[in-house]
């Protein structure tokens, strides 16, 4: 009986951990999606809210690299058929804290251009990670006048990757990894 007790306690703890973990970030969501027409491009702005759980904040400040991957899709609304995807883009925004220099390095990659910023302010890097600002999604030439379009945005948050051999022993546990549901902008039409 005594030899089974630690195993039973460990299994109960593991089940509880797996049941509670996804609920911590279940409220993360994309809001305030704005689509503007700048010169010949469609430019998207959006905000990720309630993504910074205490565990994610602690891991960032501890120096664990964290990546927010935003999936963007430009969709054309159709009446009797499924909506058509016109363009898609992946934007990766990552942060790493350098403990020796006491500064955060923010990196944004969107496939077209990469940018890097440095700051000592955690509040500033948190705002940079949560905001999609001025992302060029597609050329307006891809769009037909008179048709209705919308933009969908989804975020994937990835933080900790386990080291060998824990990545094999705990393959079923995903630490700080969660996705938001798709959020859509209001319908819009292009002007020529």
Image: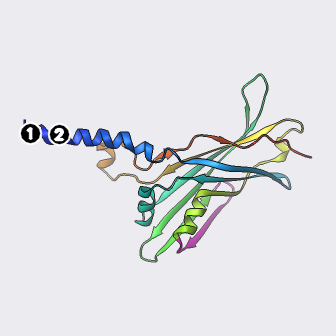
What's the residue at 77%, 32% (across, down)?
A: 77
Other residues around mark 1 within 10 Å, as few (<14) / some (14–19) / many (≥20): few
Q: Position of residue 28 (x, y in %)?
A: 54, 48
Horizontal side of residue 176 vs 147, given as left or right = left
The residue pinned by badge 2 equals: 7
Q: Secondary structure at mark 1?
A: loop
> Taking 192 as reference, is 81 above or below it?
above
State yes or no: discs 1 and 2 in contact (Cβ < 8 Å).
Answer: yes
Q: Position of residue 89 (x, y in %)?
A: 67, 47
Choose between 14 and 50: the one closer to the eye: 50
What's the residue at 81%, 42% (across, down)?
A: 188
What's the residue at 72%, 26% (across, down)?
A: 82
Choose between 116 and 51: the one closer to the eye: 51
**Rendered image: mark on residue 3:** 1
Distance between the alpha carbons at the discs numbered 1 and 2: 8 Å
Magenta stretch, residue numbers:
110-121
Q: Position of residue 163 (x, y in %)?
A: 33, 53
Horizontal side of residue 63 vs 76, given as left or right = left
> Please, which residue is most extreme toward the top here?
80
Horizontal side of residue 1 vs 170, given as left or right = left
> Taking 25 as reference, is 128 above or below it?
below
Q: Position of residue 142 (x, y in %)?
A: 82, 42
> Please, which residue is most extreme toward the bottom here?
101
């Amino acid at each position: 009986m005594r030899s089974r007790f630690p195993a039973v306690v460990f299994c109960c703890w593991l089940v509880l951990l797996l049941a509670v973990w996804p609920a911590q970030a279940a409220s993360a969501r994309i809001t305030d999606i704005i689509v503007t027409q700048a010169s010949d491009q469609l430019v998207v702005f959006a905000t990720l809210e309630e993504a910074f759980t205490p565990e994610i904040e602690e891991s960032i400040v501890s120096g664990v690299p964290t990546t927010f991957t935003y999936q963007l899709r430009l969709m054309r609304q159709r009446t009797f058929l499924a909506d058509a995807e016109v363009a898609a883009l992946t934007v990766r925004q990552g942060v790493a804290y350098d403990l020796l220099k006491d500064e955060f390095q923010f990196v944004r990659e969107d496939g077209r251009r990469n940018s890097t910023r440095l700051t000592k302010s955690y509040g500033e890097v948190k705002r940079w990670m949560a905001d999609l600002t001025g992302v060029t999604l597609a050329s307006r030439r891809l769009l037909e006048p008179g048709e209705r379009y919308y933009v969908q945005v989804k975020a994937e948050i990835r933080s900790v990757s386990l080291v060998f051999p824990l990545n094999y022993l705990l393959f079923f546990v995903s630490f700080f990894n969660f996705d938001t549901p798709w959020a859509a902008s209001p319908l819009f039409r292009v002007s020529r």
